[in-house]
Image (tube, rainbow, N blue to C red):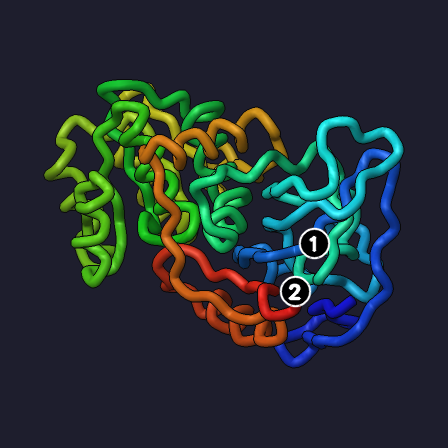
């Protein structure tokens, strides 16, 4: 099978597009013919070795964690799916080795759910990791509800776009930081935009003089450091970008595969509460270009690779 992989840590120059053996199908796995797979910042971090202190690595490492495709075979213990079923998932492994940027992916059944019929392959691949990070932050950690004022840092990015829409669907007022070129887009999602640079904290205080009830930080660094001072009494703070949030009294959120959460996200896309923003798609063999682009940051929405031309 064709796959995008690396045999050592480094920049995009370590990525190879070549043949690898098909993965072994475990008893609780489904073998999925990949139709699309999305990129996330964790992909370049894994490639550069930043996950090595927390995850065992087995080379060659196939990059990618998000997946949408068609079930080809099922493991001996799988009763939930059958060949021909369309699925999507956040395929988080126990160790770094077998990812989703491959023609065929062996995915634990707990990591996939049925693909919503209204989503394209690219949209279905773009939803899981970023959507789960936003949903789990807002619903399980921040417990956002109707009438809350929520601040989303990096609101036009992969996680931020989902976070804005989910918070609006929960009945919250949303303020989002983003570059000026994305302000019209954020307004279309229901957010009140604030520019990143300059006196952004002052502008946020002007919009919410009594402070915000919750902050979801997807930017880290300076945006995160300014966040505690923007909270109302009893306000809550999480970051999906910077573990240093714990030193500021907040919580660090690392998305987890969860069939119930991902199924609910699928419902939200189906009824129009959430739409998936695709910044750009690439053929699988051009995945290194996508890696370079996501490493640079500042893309609006998601980057996706597709394998349609291989089927």
Q: Residue furthest bottom?
A: 13
Q: Residue at image x 34%, y 51%?
A: 154
Whether residue 177 sits left or right of residue 34 in the image: it is: left
First in residue order: circle 2 vs circle 1 = 1
Estimate the spatial distance between the alpha carbons at disc 2 and disc 1, rounded to whole Å. Answer: 9 Å
Quadrant for the C terminus in the image: bottom right
Q: Residue furthest front?
A: 84
Residue corresponding to mark 2? 311
Q: Position of residue 263 (x, y in %)?
A: 53, 29
Pointer 1: residues within 10 angstroms few (<14), some, or many (20+)? many
**Residue 250 visible to an observer of this rendering:** no
Q: Are marks 2 and 1 in contact (CB under 8 Å)?
A: yes
Q: Residue at image x 25%, y 26%?
A: 172
Whether residue 300 sits left or right of residue 201 in the image: it is: right
Quadrant for the N terminus in the image: bottom right
Q: Quadrant of residue 58?
A: bottom right
Residue corresponding to mark 1? 33
Query: What SS does tag 1 mark?
Result: strand
Closest to the observer, 290 or 68: 68
Q: Residue at image x 79%, y 71%?
A: 7
Pointer 2: residues within 10 angstroms few (<14), some, or many (20+)? few
Q: Residue at image x 78%, y 27%?
A: 79
Q: Position of residue 222 (x, y in %)?
A: 36, 53
In the image, residue 60 above or below residue 97 = below
**Residue 219 visible to an observer of this rendering:** yes
In the image, residue 198 above or below residue 165 = below
Q: Position of residue 96 (x, y in %)?
A: 76, 53
Q: Position of residue 117 (x, y in %)?
A: 48, 39
């Amino acid at each position: 099978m064709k796959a995008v992989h690396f045999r050592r840590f480094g920049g995009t120059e370590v990525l190879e597009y070549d043949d690898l053996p098909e993965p072994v199908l475990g008893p609780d796995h489904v073998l999925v013919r990949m139709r699309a797979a999305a990129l996330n910042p964790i992909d370049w971090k894994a490639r550069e070795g930043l996950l090595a202190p927390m995850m065992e690595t087995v080379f060659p490492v196939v990059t990618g964690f998000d997946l949408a495709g068609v079930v080809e075979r099922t493991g001996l213990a799988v009763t939930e799916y059958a060949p021909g079923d369309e699925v999507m998932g956040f395929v988080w492994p126990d160790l770094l080795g077998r990812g989703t940027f491959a023609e065929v992916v062996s995915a634990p059944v707990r990591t996939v759910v049925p693909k919503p019929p209204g989503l394209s392959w690219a949209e279905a691949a773009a939803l899981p990791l970023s959507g789960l990070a936003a949903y789990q932050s807002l619903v399980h950690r921040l417990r956002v509800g109707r009438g809350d004022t929520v601040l989303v840092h990096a609101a036009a990015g992969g996680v931020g776009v989902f976070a804005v829409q989910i918070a609006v669907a929960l009945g919250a007022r949303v303020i989002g930081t983003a570059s000026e070129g994305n302000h019209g887009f954020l307004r279309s999602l229901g957010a009140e935009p604030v520019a990143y640079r300059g006196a952004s904290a002052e502008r946020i205080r002007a919009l919410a003089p009594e402070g915000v009830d919750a902050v979801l930080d997807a930017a880290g660094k300076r945006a995160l450091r300014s966040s505690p001072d923007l909270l109302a009494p009893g306000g809550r703070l999480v970051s999906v970008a910077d573990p240093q949030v714990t030193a500021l009294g907040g919580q660090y959120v690392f998305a987890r595969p969860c069939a119930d959460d991902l199924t609910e996200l699928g419902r939200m896309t189906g009824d129009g509460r959430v739409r998936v923003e695709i910044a750009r798609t690439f053929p699988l063999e051009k995945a290194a270009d996508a890696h370079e682009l996501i490493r640079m940051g500042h893309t609006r929405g998601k980057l996706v690779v597709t394998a349609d031309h291989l089927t």
